[in-house]
Structure formats: C-alpha cells, structure tokens
Image: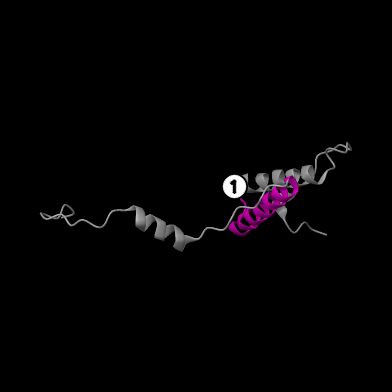
Amino acid sequence: MSNPHPNTVGLLPFRAGNSARKNSKRFQILDMQRVLKQIVVDKEAPARDLASCARAWEVFERLLRDMSGRANPKPVDVEAMAARKAKRQPSAVMIVGEDPSK
C-alpha cells in the first residue's frame, strides 16, 4: 500500500523511548506538532497540506491549553472594539486648504 502523504515518508511520528514522561499525552501532542512543523518547513508541500497542518496545530494548541488547565482565549468582538475605538478618537476635523494627495 502506498503512502497517501508522500511528504511524510522520512518522518518518524514519535520519538523513541518508553519512559512514562515521553509516553504522556502532552509529549505525544508535542511530538505530533514537531512532525507538523517539519511538513510546513518542507518547500514542496502543497497548499492544501499546509492549511491542514495549520488547523491541526490549532487543535493541538487547544488540547495542550486544556490539559494544562489554562483558560481558552475569548473570541474577539469586532463591533465592541470598533465602538470603544470610536469613543476614544476625537471627532473628525476638517482642514481647510490644498489637498496634499494631489
């Protein structure tokens, strides 16, 4: 059976070793992230593989964050940010004179 992902032929998915530390879920995720990084660094990887690696990296980061007990980042509310920014900025001032863009 041929390898469906030819750019992963020379990669080892996990480091050798059988200590409890290296077999922990955290270190397995870190090893998988290392493999993803090697795929991204490969100059011949197609764009679809790079996009898949980016998505997988995001999932692994979220898993690591959940395992460490840290809170997930809050979603950004663009409308609220724009409203706060509008309150901070002074009202528009019209300068009379020649247009500098001409």
The residue lying furthest to the left in this view is 97
The residue lying furthest to the front in this view is 87
Pick the residue in front: 8 or 102.
102
- Which residue is at a point 71% across and 46% down the rendered structure image? 35
* Horizontal side of residue 22 vs 80, given as left or right: right
Q: Is residue 96 magenta?
A: no
Q: Main secondary structure of the magenta part?
A: helix
Q: Is residue 40 above or below residue 52?
A: above
The quadrant in which residue 98 appears is: bottom left
- Which residue is at a point 44% across and 57% down the rendered structure image? 81
- Which residue is at a point 73% across and 45% down the rendered structure image? 68
- Which residue is at a point 75% across and 48% down the rendered structure image? 67
Pick the residue in front: 27 or 42.
27
Q: Is residue 96 above or below residue 43?
A: below
On the image, the x and y values in percent for residue 28 come to 79, 45
On the image, the x and y values in percent for residue 85 come to 38, 55
Q: Is residue 52 magenta?
A: yes
Badge 1 marks a residue whose secondary structure is loop
The quadrant in which residue 48 appears is: bottom right
Q: Which residue is mark 1?
A: 43
On the image, the x and y values in percent for residue 14 come to 80, 43
Pick the residue in front: 89 or 102.
89
Q: Is residue 47 above or below residue 39?
A: below
Give, as a three-letter code, the residue at label 1: Lys
Query: Looking at the image, can residue 12 be seen?
Result: no
